[in-house]
Amino acid sequence: MIRRGVIDAFPMLIPAIPFAFVIGVAVTEAQIGPVTGWSSAPIIYAGAGQLTLITLLGSGAAWAAAVTAALVVNARHAMYSVALAPTFQRQPAWFRWVGSYLLIDQVFVLAERRKNDPPAAFRRYYLGVGLSFCVLWFLFIALGLVLGPVVPTGWGLEFAVPVMFTGMLIPGLDSSPKWVAVLVAAVVTVACAGLPNRAGLLVGAVAGIVAGVLADRRRA
Amino acid sequence: MSAFLAIVAVGLGTFACRAVFIIGLARRALPAPVLHALEYVGPATLSALIVAMMISDGHVEVGAAELAGLGVAAAIGLRTTNLTLILFAGMCAYWGVRAI
């Protein structure tokens, strides 16, 4: 199961490379020093949050404003935490701490599909995915600091992330209330596109959950 | 130094978001309605996340190439769970339409 996790993580790692390079460029421009910049990988361990914080620090934003913005961007992880909480109840305490640390977007998307696996199998799969990402992300950020400023960014490889997430989202929609949840979440997120710090993501997600529950009640 | 402290602050906050329910609800039985609502957290959050990725500077930026990429990925996703294939087909559609 560890191997299965590593294999599933692999295609998701490809778009992480240009992303890490973008962060490398941001660190260079923000002039916070390569070691401090790199430390954001193990300490924050969330690409979008790292990029938000570093960009804002570099543009001279107030310390509190930069930290708040990055935390808003990262608040979606609480959604993943609640979604996987019942699965983690069947896991040992150490794994709840390690698992929480490793819970990034890609790990959530992959783990969510296996949340009903036997606990030991789930744990091995999760570690396979999570550790692959963790180790390689730290490496990519280091590479990005060195190579980021000299690599062209015109390939649009970052689009690979929404592409893969879409390919994984659709097959899981096995009931009409889930479709309602997905559509409402998408529409509300678009409607809230103007909100600062991508806060629209949170509003959209909550709206989608509420809509899904209501649609389900109506059906029952 | 202040940059490093900012990174630590965001790191602690991010870990708290990830751990709050996984560790906080470790020994608590969840009521049935909550468990029921959890079914919709994954799909709704993922959908909002995908859309948020297509937004830059407050505007949704989706052209024919993006639609082709996402559409092909969704169609392939219905037939296989092979992520490499989904990635390959979706990006080929995206690059293909973009090149036209």
Image (tube, rainbow, N blue to C red):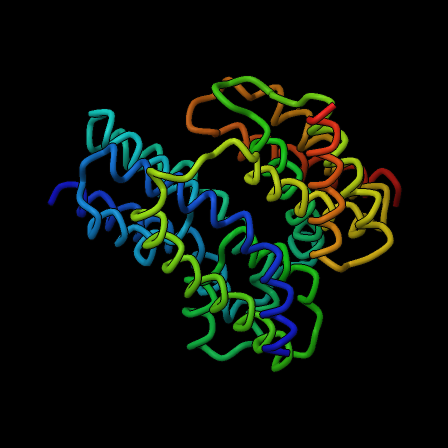
Q: Of B47 and B63, which appears nearest the observer?
A: B63
Q: How many marks?
A: 0
In the shown orientation, is residue A103 left or right of residue A148?
Answer: right
Residue B70, horizontal then vertical, whole percent: 73, 36
Q: Is residue A171 left or right of residue B32?
A: right
Q: Is residue B24 above or below residue B12?
A: below
Residue A209 horizontal/vertical position (percent): 67, 40
**Residue sitting at x 18%, y 40%:** A32
The quadrant in which the C terminus of chain A is found is top right
Q: Residue furthest left?
A: B1
Which sits in the foreground, A158 or A71?
A158
- Residue that appears at 54% across and 77% down: A91
- Where does residue B52 sit, x and y in percent of width and height? 57, 31
Q: Dividing the picture into quarters, in which one does residue A135 lie?
A: bottom left
Q: Position of residue A43 (x, y in %)?
A: 30, 56
> At x 56% / y 30%, what residue is drawn?
A203
Q: In the displayed structure, does residue A56 sit left or right of residue B29?
A: left
Q: Which residue occupies 34% across, 51% down?
A: A44
Q: Residue furthest bottom?
A: A120
Residue A198, above or below A86: above
Q: Does B41 appear above or below A206?
A: below
**Which quarter of the rendered picture does the N terminus of chain A lie within?**
bottom right
